[in-house]
């Protein structure tokens, strides 16, 4: 991966303001954050704390009002719209609560779609999609349409689609929000294995303490600022630690 030495993501003085006058909302207020390559970071906070805005700004879906975001050593503020589009397509993988799969395409075609859009020949795109589906243990379901898959399987297809470009960064927003508990556990185990075994860098927004317990670090936001940033123990100890804190 093309990352600066020891740094996959660097956020400096990040501020994001929406609206003006009486409708002005300061969603982020000078946030600093550094994520190392291969690190799995969970971001938690109450509704309106700025966690989704932070994720969208890191992913170049929202421009910052002030401050800087660097992905793989490149400042997003130096890139024009075309370059930002290419960066999102090739270096950042997105996984959202809504699976956002194309209903008329098979699982393999959905995963291959970012590569086809990027100009890769269809045969090569399909071969790489098959590899990504194998990574999330969905090879037997590769020819199925989204409507023929369970919610957990659809989310795993979405994860495979995010991984197929071999991104520098995986951004994950409430990945288990639409899943039952068993499917959610499987998705979180998959994300944990991607960090451990594939060295993927993951930043995940979640309201679920059990999901956050799977991460290496927990960043808590409140009113657009970092309230706390702590390294987590693994497994049950992390879950117990988070369950004790209602924030």
Image: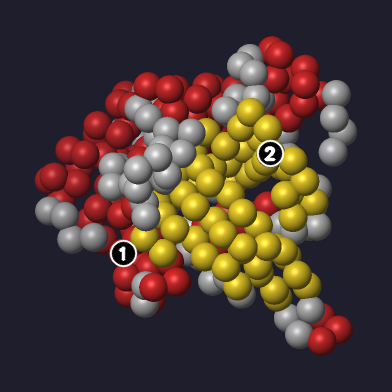
Q: Residue reaching furthest bottom?
A: 21
Q: Nearer the viewer, mark 1 or mark 2?
A: 2
Residue at which label 1 appears:
86
Direction from residue 185 to residue 161 in the image, left or right: left
Q: Rounded to the nearest whole Å, what is the CA distance between mark 1 and mark 2?
A: 31 Å
Q: Is residue 148 above or below residue 45?
A: above
> Looking at the image, is mark 1 or mark 2 earlier in the sequence?
1
Residue 87 in the image: x percent, y percent? 34, 61
Q: Secondary structure at mark 1?
A: helix
Q: Is residue 152 visible?
A: yes
Q: Which one is in front, 177 or 50?
A: 50
The quadrant of the picture occupied by the C terminus is top right
The percent coordinates of residue 213 (x first, y second) are 66, 25
Please tell me which residue is depicted at 56% across the width and 59% down the height of the picture: 12
Q: Which numbered tag is attached to residue 229?
A: 2
Residue located 52% across and 65% down the image: 68
Residue placed at 43% from the left, 22% from the top?
Answer: 196
**Label 2 packing within 10 angstroms: few (<14), some (14-19), many (20+):** some
Question: Residue extending furthest top?
Answer: 236
Q: Quadrant of residue 177?
A: top right
With 7 as the anchor, is 42 left or right in this view? right
Which of the pair 208/40 is nearer the observer? 40
Q: Kindly state the secondary structure of the residue where label 2 is placed.
A: strand
Can you give x and y, in whole percent of width and height, for residue 10 in the image?
A: 49, 52
Q: Position of residue 136 (x, y in %)?
A: 38, 27
How packed mark 1 is, by other alpha carbons closer than 10 Å (few <14, some 14-19, many 20 or more), is: few
User: Is residue 138 visible in this depiction of the protein?
Assistant: no
Closest to the observer, 233 or 169: 233
């Amino acid at each position: 991966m093309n990352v600066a030495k020891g740094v996959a993501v660097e956020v400096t003085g990040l501020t994001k303001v929406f609206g003006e006058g009486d409708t002005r909302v300061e969603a982020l207020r000078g946030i600093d954050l550094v994520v190392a390559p291969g690190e799995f970071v969970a971001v938690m906070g109450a509704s309106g704390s700025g966690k989704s805005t932070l994720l969208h700004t890191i992913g170049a879906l929202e421009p910052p009002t002030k401050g800087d975001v660097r992905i793989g050593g490149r400042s997003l503020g130096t890139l024009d719209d075309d370059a930002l589009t290419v960066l999102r397509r090739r270096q950042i993988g997105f996984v959202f609560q809504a699976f956002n799969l194309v209903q008329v395409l098979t699982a393999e075609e959905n995963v291959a779609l970012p590569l086809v859009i990027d100009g890769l020949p269809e045969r090569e795109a399909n071969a790489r999609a098959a590899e990504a589906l194998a990574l999330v243990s969905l090879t037997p379901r590769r020819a199925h349409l989204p409507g023929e898959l369970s919610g957990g399987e659809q989310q795993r297809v979405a994860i495979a689609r995010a991984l197929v470009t071999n991104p520098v960064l995986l951004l994950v927003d409430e990945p288990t929000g639409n899943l039952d508990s068993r499917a959610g556990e499987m998705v979180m185990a998959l994300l944990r294995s991607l960090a451990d075994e594939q060295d993927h860098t993951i930043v995940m927004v979640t309201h679920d303490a059990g999901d956050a317990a799977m991460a290496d670090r927990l960043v808590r936001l409140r009113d657009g600022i970092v309230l706390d940033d702590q390294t987590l123990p693994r497994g049950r100890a992390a879950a117990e630690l988070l369950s004790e804190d209602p924030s």
